[in-house]
Amino acid sequence: MSEERLDEPRSSTVGGAPVGYTGLSPLLYDPSHPLRILVADDTESSQLVIGKLLERLGHTVRLASNGEEAVRLFESEPFDLVMMDIEMPVMNGFRAAEVIRSLNESGKVVPIVAVSAFGQLNDQSQVYAHGMNDFLEKPLRVDDVKRIISENRRLDLLVTEKEHRFEALLAAVPVGVFEADRAGKIHFTNARWTEITGLAQARALGDGWLEGVHPDDRERAAADWRRSVSAGTPFNLEFRFLRADASVVWVLGQSVPFLTANGEVAGQIGAITDISRSKLIEAEHASLEAQVREAQKMTAIGTLAGGIAHDFNNIIATILGNAELVRQDVEGNTAALVSVEEIRKAGVRGRDLVRQILSFSRREAIERVVVDLAPVVQETARLLRSTLPAKVSLSVQCAPDAPCVLANEGQIKQILINIATNAMQAMRGRDGLIEIGLGQVTVSAELSNLAGKSGLKQGQQALCMTISDNGPGMDAAVLARIFDPFFTTKPVGEGTGLGMSVVHGIILSHDGAITVQSLPGLGATFTIYLPAVAPVVVDGGAVLKPAAGLPAVESGGGLRVLYLDDDEALVLLMRRYLERLGYVMTTFTVQDEALQALRADPLGFDLVLTDFNMPGLSGIDVAREVRSLRADLPVVMISGFIDEDLKAQALDVGVRELIRKEDSVEKLCDLVSLCAVAMRTS
């Protein structure tokens, strides 16, 4: 076949888009890169001519006699170009082109060129409609063939360039990219995907990626993935990968389906993003929110405590005071004394309940001294042993190096009793062991973070007190609420739900921290950390601060007392109680009336007793007025709860003493006696 001269430029197309052909580019037609070309033609002579022409240009040629044979060859061998006659028996070129195009949808797109006799192709648009890229007319010319090959080479270069750009993009993006087929099997991941998950690419292919998913998330991730693949919908899920080094990484997996040219779902393409830092921040925020909620609950209960303490303490004081008066009146009547004792016990329980509320809400000022807790623990253990069931034993181990702490002994005993009693009640008649231990630890960073703004700082020495048991333990739901006010797992009537709240409040007020470890069936361990302090040393030995006491006298000796309280029942009680002791009582329930009596006779009284929380003028206002009338007249104030602010106000107006209302019946007598002693010796 002789090579014809090049005709004038004519319009052609590549990839379905018109191309104005103006000559060959030596760069594009590169004989050093031969192609594998499939030629399909039912005419033997045409096969021979086209094959020889292409081989002479340095390319490898495979021949097919019809469209069906061409499809079989394409399925079994790789080709860079297909040249297809249109009119062929068995399967024509248009149909064969459609089949070939469907076979290489997911791989490299191989150009298909239609070959037809001159004038045979009336409508060139049919070529593109059937998935072909270009067409040539017989007889073929060398330049036309070179043009087709050059265009194919140009497309290869463009595809290669785009592939390189895509590879560079995949290497640069900070997310792990993956591609899956229509069955959901992964067949590609980028390097970043491997970095995030810790899974080698070979292990990730197919369904292998699921092996790296955290066991707790695996079923959920697999179900969501299969649902998305099956429905052809986007995938969007947060889950964890468990890496080979046992570290856990949180990821956000996202993918969308991609389609074939026919609009069918071909598979899913997507990415995973490392969201571990976001999850950590989210957890920190949740922890802070929980702490804020806890603080709000404490504040709310503290406000409630302050609101009820006045009225409730009046009621309790009346009950206890009258019970004492009745006990004196019915002395010798055994049956009546039993009833009075039960009334007294109920009153004490009510008084203790108020104290618990005030303790856990930290609304009450508690005196703390430097103390060695080993004797306190031993003393509390002796008390507990007397109340333990026969099947429950108690052991105590106090390390000799356990440091001193700044604490209130009574509150430490309360902690031990509350936790140990809970453990004892949880065992419910079964054999059990409660262990109490004291030791010393160095505060770790983790413990310092747990303690927040308390006195526990990293590297500091701290006392470590543990109370553990081998009882039934607790599940995660109970552990999450164990320190909530009024939360209890006990039946109605067996607990108030304040015991552990009180423990929590006491520990916080001591600048300490508490942790709890427990699992169902494996018992529980409470660990309490308190800042260590240096012991008070006298003559080489550690000593504790002695408790202050008040002197007492047998009778009032005619001491004149002005008593003011807005609660009539309490006024009646105190009047009867103190008059029996020999005091001369003048009582009031209205502040103005009391002050008017004092103005009328400033020297007619030896002591003023006033409640703090009253409508109108408070006890502070009354004390200030008393001081202006007679500066040397002692004033004692009674309050439902006492904090540092109230102490400061009382000191400022010259109040001699502050006493708690629930203690007033007993302690008031001691205070009055103290005033009497002071007056008699002056």
Image: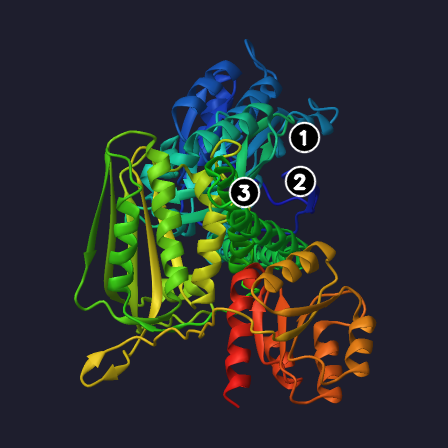
Is the Cβ of the residue at disc 1 closer than 8 Å to that at disc 2? yes
Task: Give the Cα separation between the discs numbered 3 and 1.
Answer: 103 Å
Question: What residue does disc 2 label?
Answer: 13
Q: Answer with mark 3 or mark 1, whichever residue precedes in sequence.
A: 1
Expressed as whole percent of the image width and height from the top left, the position of residue 32 reads: 39, 49
The answer to whether 623 is drawn above or below residue 508 in the figure is: below
Q: Residue at x 63, y 32 (%)?
A: 135
Query: Which secondary structure, mark 2?
Result: strand
Q: Report the disc number at residue 261.
A: none
Expressed as whole percent of the image width and height from the top left, the position of residue 582 reads: 58, 67
Q: Is residue 651 visible?
A: yes
Q: Residue at x 24, y 63 (%)?
A: 374
Q: Residue at x 62, y 68 (%)?
A: 638
Expressed as whole percent of the image width and height from the top left, the position of residue 671 reads: 53, 73
Q: Is residue 458 left or right of residue 11?
A: left
Is the Cβ of the residue at disc 3 closer than 8 Å to that at disc 1? no
Question: What residue does disc 3 label?
Answer: 343
Please tell me whether mark 3 or mark 2 is closer to you in this view: 3
